[in-house]
Amino acid sequence: MNSLSPLSALANSSGLPQLLLALALLLFSLPSPAREQPDPVALDAAFKPAEQAAQLLSLTEAKALKGLKRVAVSQFSVEFVTSDSVSAETSGFAAAGRARVTAHHRLIGVGQAEFQALGDAMHAEFLRQLQASGLEVVPSEQVLAAPSYRKLAATGLAMPDVQDGAITVAPTGMTLYGANRLAAQTSQSAGLLSGLQAFGSAMSAIGNISEQQALQAELGDAALLDVHLRVHFVQLTNQNKGFFGRLASQASVSAQTAPSIRSARMGVQVGAYSAQLALKQALTLDTSAFSEVRESASSKAEIAGAVLAGLISLASGSKNNSDSQRFETVAEPNRYREVLSTGLAQTQAMLVARLQAER
C-alpha cells in the first residue's frame, strides 16, 4: 500500500472538521520563509535533461508512480513574470543616518500574445514527450469534455490570469483549480482580502478531491498530471540582508539580467495518492533573448555603461537618503521565443525523464 502524503492524508481523514482541513490546506500552500537560494544552473548546449533529472528535481511519494501507464494532463500553465522590484535599507546605527534604495525592473518587447503562443506550444510538446516516453496519454479534448473536469473548471481560476507583475497562460479551456489556484492566490496577492480568497479556495479544494477521483475514472483510470512552470527575467538582490548588512554606510541593491526558469513542478494524482516533482534550482537561459537593459524614461538619473546581462548596481548613501530607479529589459521577440522554447522543453523533458525512471 502506498503511503499517503501529508496533504493526501489530511484530505482523506474523516476526523478533521472541514474548517481545520481548509486551514491545513492553506498552510501547506503558503510560500516558505525566505532562505538562501542555491546557485542557478546554466541550461546550455551541454545540458542533458535525462542525466540532470535526478539531481535537479525533488520527489515526494515516489511509490505512487510505480506501474504508471495511462495519464491525462488536467492542468498545464506557464507563469511569465513581467515586473519585479527590490529594496534595501540601513539601520542608521553605524552611519550618520538611515538610507534606503529601491529598484524596479520591467520586461518589455513581449507580451500576452507571445506568452500564450509559448504556453500552447509547450503544452503540445509536453504531450509529445509523455507519449515518446511510452505512456498512454489521454487526448486533451477528451479531458476537457469530461463531466468531472467541467465541474472542476467551474470552480477554477480562468486563464489567462493577468496581474500587475505576471501573466499566467494555459491552453484554451483549462483553468487553475484546487491547490494550483490556491498557490496562485497566495503568491500573487497580499492582505486580508487575498487571505479570505485563499481560504475560500482552500474550502473549494476539499470538494475537488472527490471530483478528481471521479475524473480519473471517467478517463479510464488515468493518473492526473498538473504542471506549472515559472519564467523570470532578472535576479534581484538586496545587498543589505542580515544584521551586518543593515549596519553598512550605504543601502545597495543589484540586478543580474537573464531569462530563467525559476520553478517547475508537477503533481501526479493516482487514486487518492499524490506524488510531487519540483525543480530544486533555477535554470538560467541564453541572454541573447534580450537586446538591451536601460533606465526607464520616467527615471531622472542615467545608467553608466549598463550592459546586457551585466550586474546593475544602485546605491544610496546615509543621511536619511532614499533613492528609487526604474529599469527596462527589452526582449527581442523572435530570439526570446527560441530561447524560452528550448529552455522550457528541456525542463519538461526532465520532468518526463524522472517520471519514466520512477515508474
Image (tube, rainbow, N blue to C red):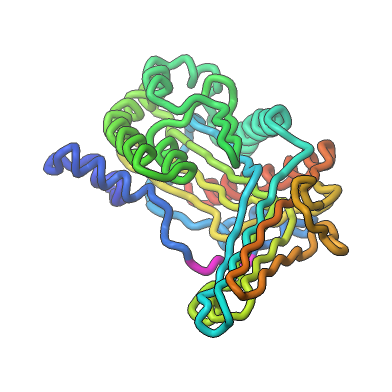
**Residue 37: in magenta span:** yes
Residue drawn at the location 46% of the way across and 31% of the way down: 176
* Magenta stretch bounds: 35-39
Q: Which is the main secondary structure of the residues drawn in magenta?
A: loop
**Residue 224: in magenta span:** no
Q: Position of residue 22 (x, y in %)?
A: 25, 40
Q: Position of residue 19 (x, y in %)?
A: 19, 39
Q: Is residue 176 above or below residue 100?
A: above
Residue closest to the eye, 45 or 284: 284
Residue drawn at the location 42% of the way across and 44% of the way down: 186
Residue closest to the eye, 252 or 351: 252
On screen, residue 317 versus residue 178, left or right, reads: right
Residue closest to the eye, 176 or 308: 308
Residue sticking out furthest to the left: 15
Is any part of residue 128 visible from this angle? Answer: no
Q: Is residue 42 above or below residue 231?
A: below
Q: Position of residue 307 (x, y in %)?
A: 85, 60
Residue closest to the eye, 219 or 333: 333
